[in-house]
Image: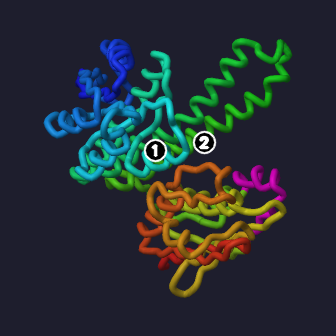
Amino acid sequence: MSALKLLIVDDEPGIRSGAERVLRDFSVGYPFMDEDFTFEIYEAETGEKAIEMIDSTPFDIILLDNKLPGIDGIEVLEYIKNKEYDISVMMITSYASLELAIKATNNGAFNFVPKPFTPQELKTSVENITKNLFLRRMTRKMKEEGKQIRFQFLSVLSHELKSPINAVEGYLKMMKDKQIGNNLDDYMEMVERSIERIKGMRNLILDLLDLTRMESGKKNRDLRTIDIIEIAKTVVDSVEPLAIQRNIKLKIESDDTLFMTADKNEVEIILNNLISNAVKYNKEDGEVFVSLRKTASNIDIVIKDTGIGMSEDEIGLLFQDFVRIKNNKTKFITGSGLGLSIAKKMVELYKGTIMVESTPDVGSKFIIKIPV
């Protein structure tokens, strides 16, 4: 096990000794960590004493009371920030206010623990701050080693999978305890929601696997002559149930056949990401137009929707890894932030380009050009 140095700064001896007892034999572990963390506990009764100790000892975590004799906790927090110490700080206070919360957050505080707290509340808070510290340091390490993609893998999995796993677990517990009776039909909504959550997790994992295979250069490609019209029809058929739910019309305009040498799976991923997005980010009663044509020099693929559209700033972020456009119109739309990034990388495998034109509240048009 690795021991993290944890400093408790509080002028109340009972708080310091109580926290020390709770954390003395406590350890934190996660499936994605190589080993569990234990805690080496230190104590300080004033802000001045805390600063003296911080300057001489490389602490990892500080539990910091705000109301201290002499300088208060916020001043200690500001000192840590100005010195750029690699320390995660959690405020423990009976006098939390909105003003204090904003000031503490701006100075880098991770969270608040209100006094009085139970042993379990303290353990949960320390567990969360330990996870945050681990991920933050892992970010830095991966960047230094040029392995940012591995951290992104870890970070996205830990954040994006947590919520659906918790939801499915909650539904299963409710069904196990028969909380709404013995009638199986009463639980159908929970079952449907669980299935949707699992689909979302599966899609995230598949997106991550596609991305890492491409980044590593180890993706096996099966290049052969294929008809991309047939692939487009298959994709539209798979997306149509979602479109029907929202009364969105899907239309394909194309030549009778359109052959190219390509990996069928790659073309399907490109079209699926773009067409499914055109449905997801559309308006109720909207339309999606898919056009596939061959010119003298290119294969042109255009996917146009009548959806919520994007601003110029949002378009600039669109094809980055792990980036999702977040605003009031998209907050209920799930996704990994990888679909368009993967589509762009795959288009570029064929020396092609992908561009987007969009107007807020009018719609978006994605244009792919692949040299013949």
Q: Which mark is residue 200?
A: 2
Residue 133: name its quadrant.
top left
Q: Which mark is residue 67?
A: none
Res. 156 in view: yes
> Percent position (x, y) of residue 107?
38, 49
Q: Work out whether residue 291 or residue 196 is closer to the camera in this orientation and state it.
A: 196
- Secondary structure of the residue carrying numbered label 1: helix
Q: Is residue 367 above or below residue 248?
A: below
Q: How many marks are shown on the rendered structure? A: 2
Q: How is the structure coloured here?
A: rainbow
In the picture as drawn, the residue positioned furthest to the front comes out as 70
In reply to whether residue 243 is colored magenta, the answer given is yes
Q: Residue at x 42, y 74 (%)?
A: 351
Distance from disc 1 to disc 2, alpha carbons, whole Å, reads 13 Å
- Secondary structure of the residue carrying numbered label 2: helix
Q: Is residue 304 above or below residue 266?
A: below
Task: Name the mark nearer the viewer: 1 or 2.
Answer: 1
Q: Residue at x 68, y 31 (%)?
A: 194
Q: In the rendered structure, which disc, 1 or 2, sits on the residue that comes first in sequence?
A: 1
> Percent position (x, y) of residue 227?
60, 65
Question: Label 1, on which residue?
Answer: 156
> Percent position (x, y) of residue 21?
34, 12
